[in-house]
Amino acid sequence: MKKIILFGNSGAGKSTLAQKLAQQENLAHLDLDTLAWAPTHSAQDIPQRAPIEDSAEKISQFRLTNHSWVIEGCYSDLLALTLTYATEVIFLNLPIKLCIENAKSRPWEPHKYPSKEAQDKNLPMLIRWIEDYATRNDEFSLKSHTALYEKYQGNKSMITSNEN
């Protein structure tokens, strides 16, 4: 029974690796992007985080419904809620340059954007976000991810290149 938490910077390859692990290991897959944000009513709405209590409830339901799983995202506050249940932690700690290259070449993510054009329009903002990873102090930062990784005492690995 595998229960994997996977995290890292935007563009690090979390979704790609999580999908691969889910397929190979027959794991349920939860992308935290699908529950971390409150619904928007129009394209002009500024995305807002959903209340952490709502996200925590959805994560708990997922965890209790599935015996084996992979949960991925960049939200240290949400990932911390699952840390005691995980059998493995994977930190995708790629260089920022690689994360930017990955973001530029990612396929359309229909669960995040209404079209490939809308996704591409957001790319300059995403690149700035990726570039700030090491200097931010929020739950999406290198500092926060490193603390989460160091806190976990079980089976863990850090991936630092696309070749791993």
Image (cartoon, grey):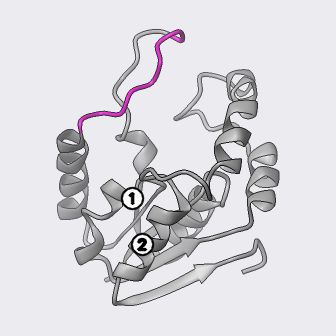
Is residue 26 among the parts visible in the rendering? Answer: no
Q: Is residue 158 left or right of residue 81?
A: right
Find numbered disc 2 in the image and state the secondary structure of the residue it sits on.
helix
Q: Position of residue 32 (x, y in %)?
A: 41, 49
What amino acid is labelled 2 in the image? Ala
Q: Judge left or right: residue 81 versus residue 90.
A: left
Quarter of the rendering containing residue 5: bottom left
Cα distance in 3D space between marks 2 and 1: 9 Å
State the residue at coordinates (52%, 35%).
111
Residue at image coords 32%, 55%:
77
Q: Residue 48, how many percent across, how many down?
A: 39, 27
- The residue labelled by disc 1 is 76
The quadrant the N terminus occupies is bottom left
Count numbered badges in the picture.
2
Answer whether labels 2 and 1 touch (C-beta < 8 Å): yes
Disc 2 target residue? 147
Q: Amino acid at mark 1?
A: Ser
Does residue 121 show up?
yes
* Magenta-tinted stretch: 43-51
Whole-percent x, y for residue 125 in the image: 68, 32
Earlier along the polypeptide chain: callout 2 or callout 1?
A: 1
In the image, residue 43 above or below residue 72: above
